[in-house]
Amino acid sequence: MDHLGIHPESGAWCFIDKIPQPPADVLHAAGNPRIRPATMPPLGMLGAVLGAPFMPLLMLLTLLAEAEEAVKRALDTKDEKERRLAKKEEDRRRDAIIARQGLDKVFDGDWHGNAGQFLLRWYSHSTHHQRMLFATEEGIVLAAPPKRVSVGREKRLQVVARIAASEATLDDPFSGEFETRILLIRFSDGSWLRVDTEELRSDLHMYVLRQPLPHN
C-alpha cells in the first residue's frame, strides 16, 4: 500500500449498517452531510438487469441446496446432531450478547460523541458503500474509491480518513469467543462505531486478537 502512503499491519474490506436518521439540530450543526451511500452506478445496474432472468434458476438451486441440507440433517449421527445443537446454542448466546450490549446498532447512539461525529462524516469522505480498513502503527486508516463503483474498487483506493492511535482503537467485542464479522472502532471518549468485515473472522480480527490488552 505504498501508493497510499501507509504501511499497514493488517487490513480488510468492511461496511457499516444503515445510518439512523440524526436529530435535525445535529444534522444541521454538522452541515447537513450525506448519510447514505451513492446509488449503484450504471454499470452495476446493467449487471443487475442482465442477471435478473437467472434469478428463478438461482432460487431453484437455493431450494435444492436447502432440501439437500435437510436430508443430511435427517441422516446425522448422534454426535453430529449434538454438534449442530451446540452450534445453535452458541449462535443464540452470541445473538443475546449482541442485543444486550447494543451491538445490533451501527454506533453507541450518542451523536455528540466522537463515534457519532465521525459517523456523520462517513459518506462525506466517500460515497462508496465499502471501506478498506487498515490497522497501522499510527492508528486506523480508511480507504475507498472517492465515488461508488461496481468494479475495480482496489484500483481506485484513496485514503479517506485517518484516526490516530491516541483517538481510537480496534476491538473484537467477543475477544475471539465467536466467529463473527463484527469489529468496533472504540474512541477515547468511550463511544464506538461498529464495522462488519466481508469475511468471517478476517485477518483484521486475528490481528486485533494478537494485540496486548490495554492496561487500566
Image: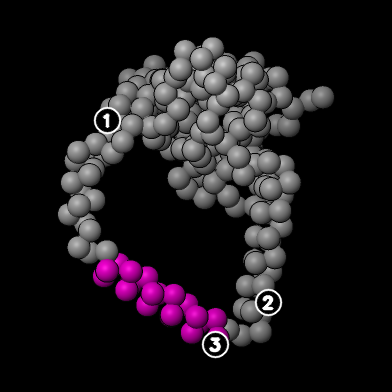
Going 33% across and 69% down the picture, which residue do you hit? 59
Residue 153 visible, this angle: no
Q: Which residue is mark 3?
A: 75
Residue most extreme to the right: 216
Hey, what amino acid is under mark 3?
A: Leu
2 or 1: tag closer to the N-terminus: 2
Q: Which residues are magenta?
A: 56-74
Mark number displayed over residue 82: 2
Hey, what amino acid is under mark 1?
A: Lys
In the rendered image, residue 61 lying in the magenta stretch gets the answer yes
3 or 1: tag closer to the N-terminus: 3
Whole-number angstrom distance, CA of label 3 to CA of label 1: 48 Å
Q: Which residue is mark 1?
A: 155
Q: Residues within 10 Å of mark 2 (few under 14, many from 20)?
A: few
**Marker count (numbered):** 3
64 displayed left or right of 134: left
Hey, what amino acid is under mark 2?
A: Glu
* Residue 3 x %, y %: 33, 20
Q: Are marks 2 and 3 in contact (CB under 8 Å)?
A: no
104 displayed left or right of 134: right
